[in-house]
Amino acid sequence: MGYPTLIMNSWEGLFVKADMPADILNKIKTASREILADPSYLSAMAPTGMEEWKIPFDTVQSAFDDEAKAFARDAEELKIKFD
C-alpha cells in the first residue's frame, strides 16, 4: 500500500532577487554559514527529522531542477495525477 519508491523532500532556504547587490548577498551568505555551523541550530533541527544539506549557492538551481525531474518521473510511473 502507498508509494514505497516515492521519495519526497522538503526544502528550507533563503531566497533573494537575482539582482541583489553583491555586498548584501555576501552578508546573507556569511550569516547563513554561521547559522549552519551553530551546534544549537543543528540540535534544534534533529527532533523535526530535518537534516542539514549544505548545497553551494551556485548549484541550488540545478539541485532544485534535479529533484523536480525525479519527482515528475516518479509521479508519471506511479500514475499520480495533480489537479
Image: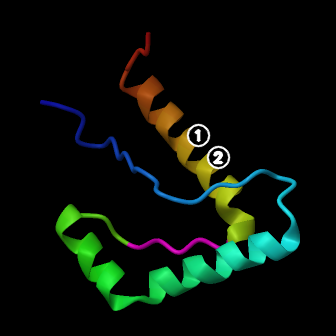
Q: Residue 61: x and y, percent? A: 69, 54
Report crowding for label 2: few under 14, some 14 to 19, many 20 or more residues within 10 A (C-alpha).
Answer: few
User: Which element type, helix, strand or loop, lies under badge 2?
Assistant: helix
Q: Residue 31: x and y, percent? A: 59, 80
Residues at marks 1 and 2, CA–CA distance in whole angstroms = 6 Å
The residue lying at 38 percent from left, 19 percent from top is 79
Asked if the magenta segment contains residue 47, the reply would be no
Q: Which residues are magenta?
A: 52-56
User: Which element type, helix, strand or loop, lies under badge 1?
Assistant: helix
Give the side of residue 77 with respect to residue 6, left or right.
right
Of residues 60 and 67, which is closer to you in this image?
60
Q: Which mark is residue 65?
A: 2
Give the side of residue 30 with respect to residue 42, left or right.
right
Give the side of residue 32 with respect to residue 26, left or right.
left
The residue lying at 83 percent from left, 59 percent from top is 20
- Residue type pointed to by label 1: Lys
Q: Residue 77: x and y, percent? A: 42, 27
Seen in the picture, residue 34 relative to 67 is either above or below; the reply is below
Determine which residue is flagged by label 1: 69
Give the side of residue 24 with respect to residue 28, left or right.
right
Seen in the picture, residue 31 relative to 68 is either above or below; the reply is below
The residue lying at 18 percent from left, 31 percent from top is 2
The residue lying at 44 percent from left, 9 percent from top is 83
Discs 1, 2 touching: Cβ within 8 Å: yes
Q: Which mark is residue 78?
A: none
Report crowding for label 1: few under 14, some 14 to 19, many 20 or more residues within 10 A (C-alpha).
Answer: few
Q: Residue 66: x and y, percent? A: 60, 50
On-image quarter of the N terminus: top left
Q: Which dot, 1 or 2, sits closer to the camera? A: 2
How many circles with numbers are drawn on the protein?
Answer: 2
- Residue type pointed to by label 2: Asp
Seen in the picture, residue 47 relative to 77 is either above or below; the reply is below
